Every structure is written in C-alpha cells, then in structure tokens.
Image (cartoon, grey):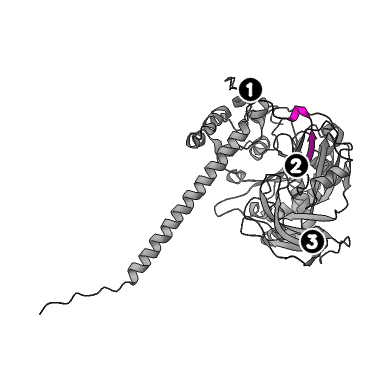
Amino acid sequence: MFGARLFPGGVHPREGENGKAVNGGNAIRELPAPPRVIIPLQQHIGAPAKPLVKKGDRVLTGQKIGDAGGFVSAPVHASVSGTVVDVQPALLANGTAQMAVIIDNDYKDEWVQLTPAEHPETLSAAELQYIIREAGIVGMGGAGFPTAVKLTPGTGKTIEKLIINGAECEPYLTADHRLMLEQAAGIVDGIRLTMLALEIKEAIVGIEDNKADAIAVMTEAASHVEGLTVRALPVKYPQGGEKQLVYALTRRKVPAGGLPLDVGCVVMNVGTCYAVHQAVREGRPLISRVTTVGGLVNNPGNFLVRVGCTVENLLEACGGIKPETKQLLYGGPMMGMAIARTDIPVTKACSGILALGQAAMEPKESACIRCGRCINACPMNLMPAKIDAFARVNDFESAEKFGAMNCMECGVCTYTCPAKRSLTQSCRTAKKVITTRRQREAARKQAEEAAQKAQAAADSKAIPVEEKKEG
C-alpha cells in the first residue's frame, strides 16, 4: 500500500436505503429479454455506428446491425432476434435524440453463427484487437470509450502496464462487485487476453477494501497469471477515476490534459475485461451487461440485461419504485444523469438505475461563501468556484485558463459545496462550449486551407495570355 492518501481531494459520499451494503449481497439475476429493444447507434465516445439494417428486416441475436462510423467508433449488435420495426431517433439519458434500431422480439433467441478463437494465445496482437473491435466492446465503467482504440496506441506511444478498475467507488453501484465474485475466472482471462493484445507483461487490478470478498476471489484467480497482481485500495471517491487509479497503483502522474497512455498505461474496467473474454473465447459480441437497480425500489438487485431494454423493464423487475421516490438517476448519484421518463434504453455503459428521495433533489443554491471546500476536495486540483463564476457570465476563455477542460465531472465539488451551487454543471457547460468553439475553429482553418490549396491548383493551371505587340 502507498498509504491512506493516494490522491488529492476526494470525498466519502453517504448512501441511503438499498445501497452497497444491501445490493452487494444480491447475486446477479438474468432479466428475460423484453418484447421490444431500442438499440442506439451512439453508445460510445466517437462517431455513431452506421446502420446496416432497415425497417422490415429480420435479425438474429448477435447480428451486427450497425458498423463503426470511423476509427473512434464501435459496431452495435442485435440483442434479440426478431423484426426491425424502424431505424429512427430515440431519446437517450443525456437528453439527446440519437438514431436507434428498434426490434420487436420474436422470443426465438436465434443466434448468428459464433466463431470463437480456437487458440487465442497463438493470435497476433492485431488479430486480437480486430476481434475486440468487431465485438463492439467499449468501456463499461461509464465513459464508453471504444476498447480497440485503447489497444492501438499511436506512433511513439509505449504501453507498459494494464490497469484494471475494480474500485466501483460510486455509491449504491454493485454491478462490478458481483461480477468479480461470480465471474472472476472470466475477468482474469479477459485481462490476460488484453495483455496479449497490448503485448505487455504487467497488469494490476485495483479494488476498494470495502469489497474484501472480491479481493480474495480475484487474488486467487489472478495467482494463475504471471505478471497480474491485485491490490486493495482505501475507500475514497473518485478512486475509480482513470488518473486517480493510475497514480494510486503506479505513482505515475497523468499530465493535465493528457491520458494514461502518456505515462505508459491503459485503464480498463472489470466488466470490459469480461466482455473481452466472451468475445475471444466464445465469439460473443457485447449485447448484455450487469446493471445495478437500487435506492427506493421494492426489490433492489443486480441484473444481467440485454442492451436496448428500457429503464421501465428494469424497474418492473424490481417490483416498482416506492411512493417517496422523487428522482430517477441513470448511473450513480455522483456522475449519473437525472431522467424524467422510463422509456430510455439501457446502453453498454449503463452501470445502474437509482430511485432516490427528496434528499437527492437539488436544493436552492445561494451565493458562494468562498470557503474553499470545493478546491480542497477536487481530485484534479482545480478551482471549481472560479470556473463556475466565469461560466455563469459566459467568460469561457477565463474558464479554460483555470483548467475547465481538465474537469472529470466527478461531482465532488457540488457534493461538498455548502452553498449548494451547481459547480459540476458549470464545468460541464464550460467544457462543451470550449470544445464546440475548438471544433468550429478547426473546421474554419481546414476550410481556409482547402480553399488556399484549390486556389493554388487553379493558379498553377492558368495559361498566361501574351499581349499583342503593336507593329
């Protein structure tokens, strides 16, 4: 251990009813496939997938229905067999409408032909990366970054260590905890296959020490793999943040604006590693995941659900919500998104659905009292109150100077603020505006360069006309 204070800042969020203490003991239950699934073509960071099916087509379970729309993208697959009702926009948890393939389940669950790798250990790194890409695997800890992209570092980048996130530091969520208890061998095999895909010899699993049973099970499973170790970490949010986890396990500091790749590390979630195991050993694409349903529900649990089932399907499986519920969250209470409807589909990155009471509702905010608690708690060493002040007056240039783009949107600043100011939301807004401006500027420069090249090409082809000389 490196000591109790493994990264600056952080908090110990409180939990209410049906938190980790309850759901951590609930074994994973497979939720029956729903009568209809809504499968978004944008379930990942990067370009949305391009649809491969149309209204009226019959599809099989595991069939690719959307192909990667670029290098930073991922395919999507049918999670049931049945008939495509339509390909149309559907509302997602973030409030945006994205194209989705809607499929009516025929309840036959007829699968496409799966092609497991017979001897994965003999495959090249490129061949393993291809399998992972075609399986549509993305980060399942919440970010949804295409896994195959992480496994193909650019020129000049060297990967030395694979860091596995088993911390699951968000309150209430226990999906990863249960997966480690019930599928430790598969997770460890996925880690080993990922090591082969990266051509590295060292991997470290970090698990918070409030999951002693998972630490024991994972340590036993990891003992059979050379170069793989499991380490217990103190309970502190956001222990599972990429930069915080890398520092805790390696003492390497990811630079501001940088990625773990910049310090020779790749970070993956335990659920993602299990998906790698299924893709390589069984030939299965990513069409299901474990999701926690907790809080003010009648029967909380951890469910293996098909991608594309709805929040309503999950709540029904838990016997519905209690009357005192005031808010539904898609994800955890710190980084999750409040939703106002239950027809929103579960995606590859959905780790939980929570029903919370009055205490979770945002109280009326007051003026900043300049206590500095948000600064002390910020794991990225930012000044959230300053960024918030600039964002509120649309001074995004100053917000950028104070490091708004380095915000990981963990919610710690808002949680600690005695004035109840929406600091995280201000940082999130600033990041969106700054990113949009950068994209517009890049597009403008690209257009100017294209125009200049076109003009230069036209000038080079121009034939000069000689003036007639007077006789």
Give the structural element (helix, strand or loop) at label 3. loop
The quarter of the image holding the C terminus is bottom left
Circle 2 is placed at which residue position?
229
Above or below: residue 15 compared with residue 441: above
Q: Residue at x 60, y 46 (%)?
A: 261
Q: Residue furthest bottom?
A: 471
Residue mark closest to the camera, 3 vs 2: 3
Magenta span contains residue 353: yes
What is the three-letter code of the residue carrying label 2?
A: Thr
Of the numbered discs 3 and 2, the one sitting upstream in the chain is 3
Question: Along the line of sight, which residue is nearer the eye, 452 or 58?
Answer: 58
What's the magenta bit mostly, secondary-structure-wise?
loop
- The quarter of the image holding the N terminus is top right
Residue 62's tag is: 3
Q: In terms of secondary structure, where does tag 1 sit? A: loop
Q: In this view of the protein, can residue 419 be seen by the observer?
A: yes
User: In the image, which residues are magenta?
Assistant: 343-365
Please tell me whether mark 2 sits on a helix, a strand or a loop.
Answer: strand
* Separation of residues labelled 1 and 2 (CA atoms): 43 Å
Q: Nearer the viewer, mark 1 or mark 3?
A: 1
Horizontally, residue 469 falls left or right of residue 176, namely: left
Q: Nearer the viewer, residue 282 or 353?
A: 353
Q: Are marks 1 and 2 in contact (CB under 8 Å)?
A: no
Q: Residues within 10 Å of mark 1 (few under 14, many from 20)?
A: some
Q: Which mark is residue 419?
A: 1
The amino acid type of the residue labelled 1 equals Ala
Q: Position of residue 37 (x, y in %)?
A: 80, 55
User: Which class describes the residues within 10 Å of circle 3: few (<14), some (14-19), or many (20+)?
Assistant: many
Q: Amino acid at mark 3?
A: Gly
Above-or-below relation of 196 to 263: below
